[in-house]
Image (cartoon, helix red, strand yellow):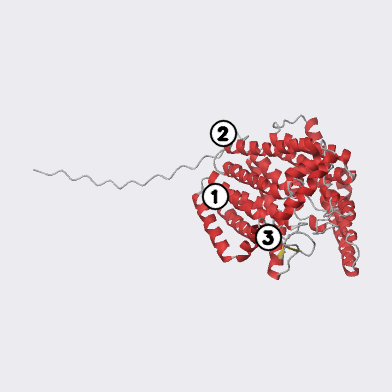
Amino acid sequence: MINGIATRWLGPYWLTRLIYFAGAAVVLAISAESGYVLATGGSKLLLVIPISVVVGLAMVAIGLVNFQLFVYIVIAVRSSLDIARPDLGNNGAAGIGTAGASGLDPAGALAVVFMLASLFWFMSRRMGKATSPPPSAHRIALFTFAVTGYLSVIASARPFVSLLEAVRVSAVAVMLAVLEIMLKDRAAIKKLLIAIYVSGLLPVGLTLFYIVLHKPQFSSGGFGRYEGTFSQPNPFAIYLTMLIVMGVALLPHLKPRIRVLMVVFVVASVVCLYHTYTRSAWVAAVIGVVAVAVIGRRKVLGAVLFASLVVGLLAVPTISQRFADLASVAGGSTVNANGNTSNSLEWRFSYWATVLPLADKNPITGIGLKMSSFETDQAKEPHNDFLRAYVETGIVGTLAYLALLLSMMIVARQGLRHSGPGFDRSVAVGFAGCVIAFVLISVVSNVITEVIVLWYYVAFAAAAYAVTRFPASEREPEPLPKAKSLPAARPAAAPSQA
């Protein structure tokens, strides 16, 4: 009604013009303010907060008008938001400033906006009596684990920090619920996959740019490492691992032009993964691709992978150098300038022995999410999701975490058994490889609370669950084998005349 009345008085395109002028004015104002901050060396908050407010309001408007588009945009931009964190740091320390400012970062604001928009979406569906598919075992287990995060706040020394972490995990669970309902057909799955791989353009592109300039973003163990738009190399490496494994699985069932683009992206991602120097992600990526080759019965892929490993070990000496310190576990270790062992595996064993007794304070519900970093002198995360679940969420959270791992395997198995041939099968195979990589990295790294990684993992999980729900009539037909050409028939001999 308002639009109709205004159209009579102001013309048919008044609203569009008003939006354009308002947007242009806001962009100019932010540009001027950003230039001033950069020129005077002002606080990063003065640059981040105005942009976050404007982008947040725009996202709210999109979420109210077109919720599906809003979800795809959230997935496409989430991987690049950590670069704008005011407290961005690479030391992994749990300082008060980091914890206190973590709620001001754009990623946290996006999580809140997403949850609010999702709440309105669920309410509108309920009022419209829209039908929804039954929740997967994965969704139930993830929501259960999120609840244990809230229970851990009871004994937390810093309740706000633990509560904020629980909210972040809840946002991931809400994303999984939204996607399981939203992915009704194959077109929606393909749009989701496009959004996921679009999310990798900026992190991968920025990393390649720094690699060409020989400007490492992070230094550890004598290696110059790269982290893209992420806060550290490790989560960036895990993110790349997921995209590489799924990308390799999708390759045979993509259109020729899209296949070329995917090959280029996967190769670029492998280059970036190598330069993160994250050994656990290297191993997980290789095993994940091997799983894709075995489960998908792709002999050519297996042969190419084997040849690449041999060439890599022989032609790239830094790969063997990165694993060299692991050989010193039995023969003693050296101590670096920070007083820690230079052998990261031995450091993990030592640090796990330090973190484990923290659970004695509250073995039932744990000491609180993210509190391991605050309760130890080294101020580091446990680098083991099983140990972290026990220490920070107690016995209750550990059981929920084990149930979550089991639910991953159940969804992967259902995808492999009940998905149709072709594209659907490739999604299921790719997710199975991602699950294997996820579990392997969880043993020696922090995955379950790397929320930025979980956003994309649950997106792949929702896609794998969706392909199992297509009825037989909607599945892609399996390509028929090529018929063997038969030899041409010989012409019959003319009858002889007597």
SS of the residue under disc 2: helix
Q: Amino acid at mark 2?
A: Ser
Give the answer, above or below, for where 176 lies relative to 49: above
Give the spatial CA distance, label 3 vs label 2.
Answer: 47 Å
Answer whether residue 12 is visible to the viewer in this image: no
Residue under circle 2?
473
Residue shown at the point (19%, 45%) measured from the top left: 493
Query: Callout 2: 10 Å neighbours few (<14), some, many (20+)?
Result: few
The front one of 438 and 8 is: 438
Residue under circle 1?
252
Comparing labels 3 and 2, the label whose residue is closer to the camera:
3
Give the answer, above or below, for where 473 lies relative to 298: above
Q: Position of residue 44 (x, y in %)?
A: 88, 61
Comparing labels 3 and 1, the label whose residue is closer to the camera:
3
Residue shown at the point (70%, 50%) measured from the top left: 444
Q: Amino acid at mark 3?
A: Tyr
Q: Quadrant of the N terminus?
A: top right
Give the spatial CA distance, label 1 vs label 2.
Answer: 23 Å
Residue under circle 3?
277
Comparing labels 1 and 2, the label whose residue is closer to the camera:
1
Residue shown at the point (54%, 62%) measured from the top left: 311
SS of the residue under disc 1: helix
Q: Amino acid at mark 1?
A: Pro
Describe residue 243's horizontal placement relative to residue 18 as left or right. Answer: left
